[in-house]
Amino acid sequence: MGLFDWLKKKNNKNTINCGSVTLSYSIEVTKNPVQEKIAALHREATTHKVSNWPAAVACLQEAADLMRQHPSDYVLDRWTRLPVFMQQAGQFDEAMQEFERLLSEVEERVRQESPDRASPAWIEYQINRNYQTIYDKMRMVCKRQKRSDDAAKYGQLSIEYGERTEELRVIVDAERKAERRAYQEKIAGSR
């Protein structure tokens, strides 16, 4: 029997047949009300951006405040939408201040959101990936404002962090491969 063949034997009675053993399971899906509110605010901001940039920015500001009050593993795009919308709403200086705030929070946020077992290389990889993405968004915003010197500066920073991210990805991939190999050896040894 292959590793995932037991999935094929699943029936509709909340049990899984694994050879001679039948496992019962139950799945309970709970929705986090804060995360639901954040998602709703992002959807609302999207609808407002067609005709009401101030309302769109207000929605994203409220979402960012909630994310800071209730830390979780939020995708980076949730964080960078606010300054991008600010720039599009004609609030370039405020957008750059928000980007600077995001940059100042990266390391603490990544460490807070990282799993307990995360390796130092994985944490460093995530930190560099965050910096790369934020600097690239800053480049884009500056380019839109026709601030080519700033766009070039942030573009260069994004490239530098991107290169470091790729170096760390190789290390993280090697760590994961070693973990899988050790796990497979452990399984094979217990048979």
Image (spheres, grey):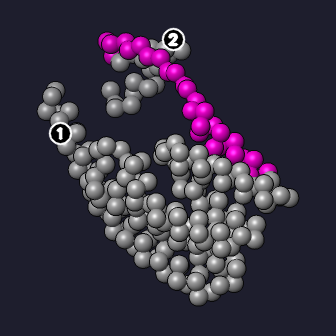
Q: Nearer the viewer, residue 52 or 187?
A: 52
The residue positioned farthest toward the left in the image shown: 189
Please provide percent x and percent y for residue 44: 75, 47
> Element at badge 2?
loop
- What residue is shown at x 48% (from left), y 44% (from top)? 72
On the rendered image, what quadrant is the N terminus found in? top left
Q: Quadrant of residue 33?
A: top right
Say which residue label 2 marks: 13
Q: Is residue 31 left or right of residue 189?
A: right
- Residue corresponding to mark 1: 185
Which corner quadrant of the image does residue 175 belong to? bottom left
Q: Neighbour class for label 1 at 10 Å: few (<14), some, many (≥20)? A: few
Expressed as whole percent of the image width and height from the top left, the position of residue 61 reads 66, 54
Could you tell me if the residues under marks 2 and 1 are in contact, i.e. CB atoms within 8 Å? no
Query: Where does the image place residue 11, in percent across and percent down from the top left?
Result: 50, 16
From this view, report whether residue 76 is shown above or below residue 37.
below
Q: Which residues are magenta?
A: 19-47
Q: How many marks?
A: 2
Q: Is residue 138 visible?
A: yes
